[in-house]
Image (cartoon, rainbow, N blue to C red):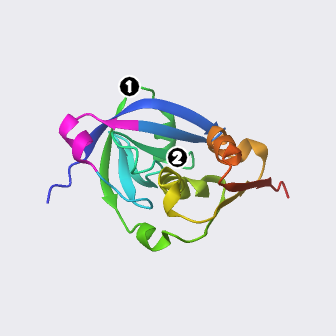
Amino acid sequence: MDYSPFKVRIESITQETPDVKTFHLTFCDPDVAQSFTFQPGQFGLYSVFGSGEATFCISSSPTRSGYIECSVKRAGRVTAELHKCNEGDVLGFRGPYGNHFPLEEMKGKNLLFVGGGIGLAPLRSLIWNVLDWRDQFADVTILYGSRSVADLVYKSELKVWQDMSDVNAVYTVDPG
C-alpha cells in the first residue's frame, strides 16, 4: 500500500475565529479529485511539507465532491505553520481514515447534533450531509455553543441553519 500523500492546493481560507481557520482544498491530480470519497466523521493527515503533519477531521460533506475542507485551531508547531499558509500553497493529505457516523441507521429518525467550539467541525460534515438529503430524516436540531461570540465557528452557516424552516437551531455562548 502506498502511503505517499496526495497533493492538495489551498483554494481559499476562512478566518473563523482569532485562532481557527477553515481550509478549502482541491486535489492537484484530477483523477484523485474525481475518485476520492469519504464518509462524515472520517479524518486525514495533513502535511505542511518541511514542517510536519497533523490529523484533522474532514469538515466538508461527502455530498459535495471535488474538494475537502478542514478547520484548524492554532495550538502547536504544525498548526501554527498551517496558519501561515496562503491560498495557492500546496499541502499533503493522506486519508480518509477512521470510522464514520452511521448515517444509514439515522435515516427516518429525529437527530440532535450537540457541539461546542471547534468541536462542531466533525459534526459539520454530518450536518451538511443530512441537510443535503433532508427528506430522509425526521426532526433535525442543532445545539451549538462556545465561550464567546468571537469563538463561534462557521458563523455564516449557523445563520443558514437557523433560517431553515425544517431545522431547529439553538446557539449559546457562556463566558463563565
Q: Is residue 146 visible?
A: no
Q: Position of residue 96 (x, y in %)?
A: 32, 57
Residue 104 horizontal side relative to residue 6, left or right: right
In this view, the residue farthest toward the right is 176
Q: Mark 1 = which residue? A: 88
Tell whether position 81 is magenta: no
Residue 158 horizontal side relative to residue 130, left or right: right
Tell whether position 31 is magenta: yes
Q: Is residue 125 visible?
A: yes
- At horizontal 65% and vertical 54% (from top left) the residue drawn is 166
Span shown in magenta: 25-36
Give, as a three-letter code, the residue at label 1: Gly
Q: Residues within 10 Å of mark 2 (few under 14, many from 20)?
A: many
Between 119 and 134, the one lying in front of the other is 134
Disc 2 and disc 1: Cα gap in Å? 17 Å
Q: Position of residue 6 (x, y in %)?
A: 25, 44
Q: Is residue 93 positioned above or below 122 on the image?
A: above
Residue 79 horizontal side relative to residue 164, left or right: left
Give, as a three-letter code, the residue at label 2: Val
Between 115 and 102, the one lying in front of the other is 102
Quarter of the image with the C terminus in it:
bottom right
Residue 150: which numbered mark, if any? none
- At horizontal 64% and vertical 42% (from top left) the residue drawn is 160
Q: Position of residue 146 (x, y in %)?
A: 73, 54
The secondary structure type at the circle numbered 1 is: loop
Q: Position of residue 61 (x, y in %)?
A: 44, 50
Q: Mark 2 = which residue? A: 72
Q: Is residue 135 positioned above or below 21 on the image?
A: below
Q: Residues within 10 Å of mark 1 (few under 14, many from 20)?
A: few
